Image: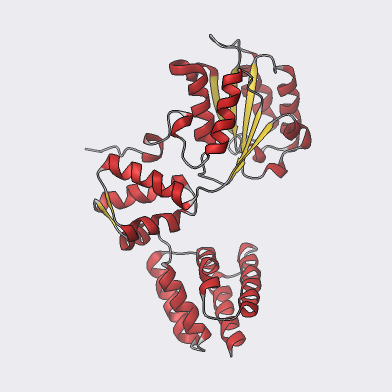
Amino acid sequence: MLVMIEIWTEKYRPKTLSEVVGHEAIVERLKAFIKAKSVPNMLFAGTAGVGKTTCAIALAKELYGDSWSRNFMETNASDERGILVVRSKIKDFARIKPLGAEFKIIFLDESDALTTEAQQALRRTMEKYTHSTRFILSCNYSSKLIAPIQSRCAVFRFGPGSDEAISRYVRRVAKAEGLDVTKDGMAAVVAVSLGDFRKATNVLQSVSILSKKVDEKSVYEVAATLHPKEVKEVLNLALSGKFLDSRKRLYDLMINRGLSGLDVIRAIHREILSVDVDDRCKARLIDKLGEYEFRIVEGGQEDLQIEAFLAQLVALKG
């Protein structure tokens, strides 16, 4: 018998704006719009997993109550990015009269994926139906949206969740699920999530399948990432002139964890400032690290580029 696994990211999504963690200033602005009964078009900009969609849905629930889904439409521009989605799906919903409310809300996720032609069509749709529809655009890079759209929106910039905010959220989930999160386990969840509430939730759920105890070891195992101590070990071996030892140790970790070259580059970037070398050397290492990341992104062979970076470490200290 197939057992369906509940997705915690939806289970613990805040139901109201007051439950949103880590974006108190943004929540206060949204509540002020609701209180004034004057909700503008809005642009939510920020990286993935920081709460943009959560705030949009919580806002709709605050405005419309239990019937929020009748006046709220969510669409993802990364799936439907052409002009047809604006001319048909979005325009058709905007034409419909709001049900028991002054206006409807169209939430367009990943709007920076829209083509320029689609954005121009969206601009005209926003102008035409401003009396009955409000638009909330969510994006990672607001600079990819045309200026006329940006100027029509109140802009909200979502930063990554702070360590304290992620910890508060993790404690809430852990309490509800009966998990025992150790002190080092909490630090590990905060470290691997990088301010991403969604990733923190997924890590907790993955660990909980194996054990109710969430400690440092289990977090790094399920997160498939390098432990800071492991990264420092590789860096220190290379800086000590032991190129072959550092190469072997890194490859062993990459194979065991199934890591890509970019995963390794980013793990090194997080730890490179704490290695025992002078600031000038650290600056040169970061410069080289950026160069090798670019090479991998552009299609360079990952193992060759990683080896080349380790060789640079040996040469700089040699």
Position in image of residue 119 (x %, y %): 72, 33
Position in image of residue 255 (x %, y %): 41, 69
- Quadrant holding the C terminus: bottom right
Q: Nearer the viewer, residue 97 or 19?
A: 19
The structure's colour scheme is secondary structure
- Quadrant holding the N terminus: top left
Q: How many marks?
A: 0
Residue 203 vs residue 310: left or right? left
- Residue 87: quadrant of the picture: top right
Q: Residue at x 66, y 20 (%)?
A: 91
Q: Residue at x 62, y 77 (%)?
A: 279
Q: Examine the rendered structure and indicate whether residue 197 appears above or below residue 188.
A: above
- Residue 26: quadrant of the picture: top right
Q: Examine the rendered structure and indicate whether residue 125 appears above or below residue 234.
A: above
Position in image of residue 130 (x %, y %): 70, 18
Q: Nearer the viewer, residue 112 or 184?
A: 184
Q: Examine the rendered structure and indicate whether residue 287 appears above or below residue 108.
A: below
Is residue 199 at all visible to an observer of this figure? no
In this view, the residue farthest toward the left is: 1
Residue 156 vs residue 65: left or right? right
Is residue 130 at all visible to an observer of this figure? yes
Q: Examine the rendered structure and indicate whether residue 2 appears above or below residue 208.
A: above
